[in-house]
Structures are given as structure tokens and as C-alpha cells.
């Protein structure tokens, strides 16, 4: 025979202070856990949304980032002539040869802390190859002019990035002529200009990567085999989406590990709090336990009843923690991408799966914290329970 759930609910209402303290402790752990998982998911989402699956990114063979890659002009010309590269109506290859460097900028006008900002020099076809890039203010840069456009993530975080401002890049000065967005991807944390202009003030006559649109989206494997087999090139070929997604793995895994490690330590405290709360409840309800056993309820029913109370407290804490974490969703923050050593702006991404994990984590704490007190309650002898009461 099972003890009715209403018994547990009435019991929890009769002890509001201890119940509230347990709920608050678990909620604090869940807020931290959900927040750190949301950071990891937000960073990964920004990197994954950076590339397109029908775009191909080419770097030097063996390079795992654009920063460590070099592509010569003659190599870029050879790749542009491959039949796998899509062309527009007038036959121009939809390919951009990119210069990629990282510069240091102050976070405020007075100096203060510094951060690494990626600068990308692109070909004029870049806006058709990466059509997720859209101007939000001003206009695109013009060919042959010292002009740049700034991603909205960088424009919001660093001074001197307004339209009309002049910024120093390498050995030259460039005018900011516009701001752009890119579906929340990593490009929003970059400064873009014409590749030939930026090549002259930074690294010299080499590119760091090539990106082109596939003529046939299903022909990636064929294009990859053809380019990598050409002895003149010595280049590695990647889907653009997979390349940027891969760059997120190191930091994403680190954030998830920290989420488990930090909240695991906090969870130990919350579990001991739940044990203390349930032990107090068991001690204060010795007469009730004796009465339940006298009425014919089996010890396992008593154990299940107290375990249910602990689980309900944890569930309430989990739900409260998720609700408290929800305002963080969409908050913009930034961190360093360890693959490129550049700062990346992204939004905290609280998704239903993250919230579900938070609730399950809370329930797990409740079950662990309530098991021993529930077992103790079930093993009480009726006579001893009545003497304690």
C-alpha cells in the first residue's frame, strides 16, 4: 500500500523554512550549472553558424586554423580555375582569398585592458560567397580604397569603431564605412577590408585561406579529392561549416568540464543540505512514522514517501533555478577562441535541452540527498519511534 502524495505535500507546507532553504540551495546550483552550459552552447552555436555547408574552406595542409596557414597567389589562382568552384552570371568565380591577422585593441578610450581582434581581408566576391553577411549601417568598403567594415560584436565592444572613425591597422589607417551582422556567427567579431589593401599593411603577398561556393553542393568529396591530390597545391580542404564547428570544440569541452566540476562541488553542499533537512524531518515525525507503520504501510512505502519529499524539494529547486537562469538567455558576452587567439562575441544560449538537463540534475541531487534519511525512516522500529516522539 502506497502513502498518498498529498501527505508529502502537506508535510512540506508545515515546514516552510527548512523546505525553502533546501529549494534555494538547489536552485543556486542549477542556476550556475545551466548558466555555464548555456555559455558553452552559445559559443558553439556562434561558431557553427559562421560557415555554410555548401562553402569550401581551403588552408595549408596540416593547419587547424587560418592563423597558422599560408596560401600563395599562384595556389589561389589554380583553385579558382577548378570546375568545382561556382560562378556568377558573368562567369566570375565565387571565391574569396582571405588575409587573416589578429590585432590588439583597448577595450575603452582611456586604455584599460586589451583584447585580440581578428581582421579579415576579403575578395570582392566575399559578400556573395558568405551571403549571411548583411550591412546594418553605412555601406560596404570599395575596391582600392583604405576602408573597412566592422562586425556589430566588435563595434559594440571597442571604442573608435563608429562609422566615419579612422582606425590604425598595421602600417596604415583605414576609415570605418559600415557595420555588418552575420547571423550571430564569428564574423560579427571581425573587421573586414579588401584583401589587397590589408595585405599591403600586414603579412605581405600571401593569403591565409580560400573560401568558395561549390558548383554542386553534393560534390564536396570530389572537390576535396581533386584539390588535395594536386601536387602543386599542398592544401587541405574542409567544409566551411565543419571547419568553424571544429574550432569550437576545445573551448566548448572546457566550459562543459568546468560546468560539471564547479557545480559538482556546489552540488555536494546542496546534497548535504538536503540530507540535513530530511534527517530533521524524520526526527520530528517519529510519531507519524510509527503511526504509518501501525496502520499497515510497509517500510518500503515509508522510504518511498520520504524519498518523494526529497525529490519534490529538488524538483522545485530545479524549476526555480531554471527560471532564474532564463533572463541570461540572449545576453551578449565574449571570450577568447583558443584556436585563433582572437576574442569572439556571442550570446548566451539557454535551450530547452539545457533546461531539461538542469532539472534532471536537480532531481538527481534530491534522490541522493534523500536516500539515507528515507532509509533511516523506513528502518525505524515502532516502539522506538513512539519513545522518541
Image (cartoon, grey):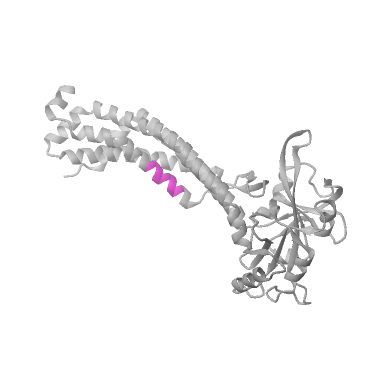
Q: Which residues are magenta?
A: 355-363
Q: 291 or 344: nearer the eye?
A: 344
Residue 93 on image: x %, y %: 75, 72
Q: Residue at x 44, y 34 (%)?
A: 265
Res. 216 image quadrant: bottom right
Tell me, yes or no, whether the highlighted magenta stretch contains residue 246: no
Residue 213 on image: x %, y %: 68, 69
Q: Is residue 68 visible?
A: yes
Q: Is residue 315 visible?
A: no
In the rendered image of this protein, does residue 233 appear above or below residue 108? Answer: below
Q: Residue at x 76, y 77 (%)?
A: 89
Res. 142 image quadrant: bottom right
Tell me, yes or no, whether the highlighted magenta stretch contains residue 357: yes
Residue that lies at the very extreme toward the front in this rendered image: 231
Residue 344 on image: x %, y %: 66, 47
Q: Residue at x 24, y 39 (%)?
A: 305
In the rendered image of this protein, does residue 144 appear above or below residue 109? Answer: below
In the rendered image of this protein, does residue 373 appear above or below residue 103? Answer: above
Residue 286 on image: x %, y %: 20, 28
324 sits to left or right of 174: left
Q: 239 or 223: nearer the eye?
A: 223
**Quadrant showing the N terminus:** top left
191 sits to left or right of 34: right
**Quadrant showing the C terminus:** top left
319 sits to left or right of 233: left
Res. 236 image quadrant: bottom right
Amino acid at each position: 500500500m502506497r502513502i498518498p502524495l498529498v501527505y508529502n505535500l502537506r508535510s512540506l507546507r508545515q515546514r516552510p523554512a527548512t523546505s525553502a532553504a533546501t529549494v534555494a540551495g538547489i536552485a543556486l546550483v542549477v542556476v550556475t550549472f545551466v548558466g555555464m552550459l548555456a555559455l558553452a552552447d552559445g559559443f558553439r552555436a556562434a561558431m557553427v553558424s559562421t560557415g555554410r555547408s555548401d562553402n569550401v574552406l581551403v588552408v595549408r595542409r596540416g593547419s587547424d586554423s587560418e592563423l597558422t596557414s599560408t596560401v600563395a597567389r599562384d595556389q589561389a589562382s589554380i583553385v579558382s580555375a577548378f570546375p568545382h568552384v561556382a560562378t556568377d552570371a558573368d562567369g566570375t568565380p565565387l571565391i574569396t582569398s582571405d588575409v587573416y591577422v589578429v590585432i590588439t585593441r583597448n577595450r575603452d578610450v582611456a586604455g584599460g585592458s586589451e583584447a585580440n581582434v581578428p581582421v579579415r581581408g576579403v575578395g570582392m566576391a566575399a559578400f556573395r560567397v558568405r551571403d549571411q553577411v548583411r550591412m546594418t549601417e553605412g555601406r560596404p568598403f570599395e575596391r582600392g580604397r583604405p576602408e573597412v567594415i566592422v562586425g556589430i560584436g566588435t563595434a559594440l565592444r571597442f571604442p573608435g569603431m563608429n562609422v566615419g572613425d579612422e582606425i590604425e591597422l598595421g602600417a596604415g589607417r583605414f576609415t570605418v564605412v559600415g557595420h555588418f551582422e552575420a547571423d550571430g556567427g564569428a564574423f560579427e567579431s571581425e573587421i573586414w577590408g579588401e584583401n589587397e589593401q590589408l595585405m599591403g599593411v600586414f603579412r605581405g603577398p600571401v593569403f591565409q585561406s580560400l573560401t568558395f561556393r561549390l558548383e554542386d553542393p553534393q560534390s564536396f568529396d570530389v572537390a576535396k579529392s581533386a584539390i588535395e591530390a594536386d601536387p602543386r597545391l599542398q592544401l587541405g580542404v574542409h567544409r566551411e561549416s565543419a571547419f568553424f564547428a571544429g574550432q569550437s570544440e576545445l573551448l566548448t569541452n572546457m566550459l562543459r568540464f568546468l560546468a560539471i566540476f564547479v557545480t559538482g562541488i556546489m552540488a555536494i553542499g546542496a546534497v548535504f543540505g538536503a540530507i540535513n533537512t530530511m534527517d530533521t524531518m524524520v526526527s520530528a515525525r517519529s510519531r507519524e512514522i510509527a503511526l504509518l507503520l501501525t496502520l499497515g504501510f510497509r517500510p518500503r512505502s515509508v522510504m518511498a514517501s520520504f524519498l518523494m519529499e526529497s525529490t519534490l524539494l529538488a524538483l522545485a529547486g530545479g524549476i526555480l533555478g531554471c527560471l532564474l537562469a532564463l533572463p541570461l538567455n540572449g545576453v551578449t558576452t565574449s571570450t577568447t577562441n583558443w584556436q585563433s587567439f582572437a576574442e569572439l562575441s556571442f550570446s548566451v544560449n539557454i535551450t530547452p535541452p539545457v533546461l531539461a538537463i538542469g532539472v534532471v540534475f536537480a532531481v538527481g541531487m534530491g534522490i541522493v540527498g534523500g536516500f539515507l534519511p528515507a532509509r533511516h525512516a523506513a528502518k525505524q522500529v515502532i516502539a522506538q519511534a513512539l519513545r522518541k516522539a
